Image (cartoon, rainbow, N blue to C red):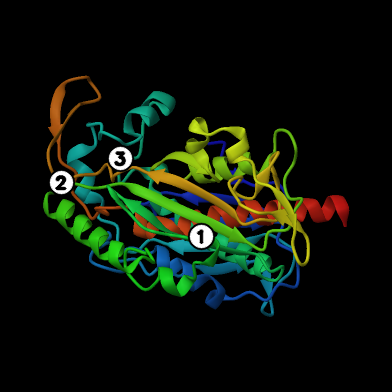
Amino acid sequence: MPGNSFGEMFRLTTAGVSHGPGYLAIIDGCPPGLPLCLDDLMPDLRRRRPGQSKIVSQRQEEDVPEIISGVFEGKTDGTPIGLLFRNQDQRSQDYADIKDKYRPGHADFTFDAKYGFRDYRGGGRSSARETLCRVAAGAIAKKILSAQGIRVIGYVKQIGPIIADIADPSAVTLEQVEATPVRCQDPVKSQEMIALIEEVRKDQDSIGGICELAATGVPAGLGEPVFDKLKADLAKALLSLPAVMAFEYGAGFSVATSRGSANNDAFIKKPDRIGTETNRHGGLLGGISSGEPIVCRVAVKPTSSLPRPQRTVTRAGEATEIATKGRHDPCLLPRFVVMGEAMVALVLVDHWLRRRGQCG
């Protein structure tokens, strides 16, 4: 199956399915000499793992990888880094009743249309469990970026109609985000969000929302001016994540009702560089980083797997109903945050390495 690799200079390749033996991640292009061990990967993997709170999936997976290559005596050696994750808590029997039914909102039908058959156990290759490979690779990317003064942080901006008040995305800290299980640093709105998630869970339903991501310390000059625009690669990276329905950066869709005189960011002299007075451009001009914080958002749909009956058809086209068993998130946003961070970090480290190769 093509399309299992992402990145140019820093490339991630993943393999595996959610109810198979496990997942394999290959990270190629990591510079040699980077101190690396499991302790560098586990904080973000724990933020992604299921079972971490009552408002997420209760599947019990420790998600501790084996580093099988690319690290020697505690440092990367310049060869591909291989990570092996073994699945532990599969319940494939939960999916036996739906093997010949198409789940609304899932890739069941499109997989059948493309390949002529599918792995019905939890979605197979399209399962969001694949993102643990991305999060592990993102943790490595974050470590490289951190040495350059670049930081990536994500948080829940909105769940359903509840919108958090975030005055300055670049000022948000990891400690603020991790203070609540919903990963929203607005203390009032976070409690409202948790209550809403509990409400839809009890109603055997789900709810969507928006994750906002901010990258600070990004130097001006990352990205290419035509097809490999930084904004284009960020969009592809984030839209490649399961359940993402829309992407915007900076002022986003609000520019459709703005005038140029109000939307443009005036250039000014800052203490250490030329910058802009405001940041409606979200840190990206002409597809190249401007030196201002990169701020983008993605809309994440409600979880498609529901225990309540939904109308569908069988592979033979016969009308039927489906109720998905198993352990599913009533809201994807709390666990999505670290996945979004990982994809932003992978894009930034890839373009940082590309620029280093171009300009030295």
Residue toward you, 284 or 231: 284
Farthest residue toward the bottom?
A: 73
Q: Quadrant of residue 76?
A: bottom right
Q: Which residue is mark 3?
A: 120
Q: Report the mark closest to the observer, 2 or 3.
A: 2
Q: Residues within 10 Å of mark 3 (few under 14, many from 20)?
A: many
Q: Give the CA separation, mark 3 to mark 1.
A: 40 Å
Residue drawn at (21%, 26%) of the image: 314
Judged by depth in the image, the label closer to the viewer, 1 or 2, is 1
Residue at 33% across / 42% down in the picture?
A: 301
Q: Amino acid at mark 1?
A: Pro
Question: Dot 1: within a 10 Å radius of its alpha carbon, few (fewer than 14), some, or many (20 or more) residues?
Answer: many
Give the residue pinned by disc 1. 169
Residue 206 picture location, percent across and down: 22, 47
Count every numbered label the image shows and give the total: 3
Determine the residue located farthest toward the top in the rendered image.
317
Confirm whether residue 11 shows in the render: no
Which residue is identified by label 2?
A: 307
Residue at 18% in and 48% down: 325
How far across and down, in percent of the image, does residue 33 sit? 75, 73
N-terminal of the pair, mark 1 or mark 2, is 1
- Provide residue 182's location: percent of width, then percent of height: 32, 63
- Vertical placement of residue 315 versus 87, above or below: above
Query: Secondary structure beneath disc 1?
Result: helix
Name the amino acid type tagged 3. Answer: Tyr
The residue lying at 34 percent from left, 64 percent from top is 88
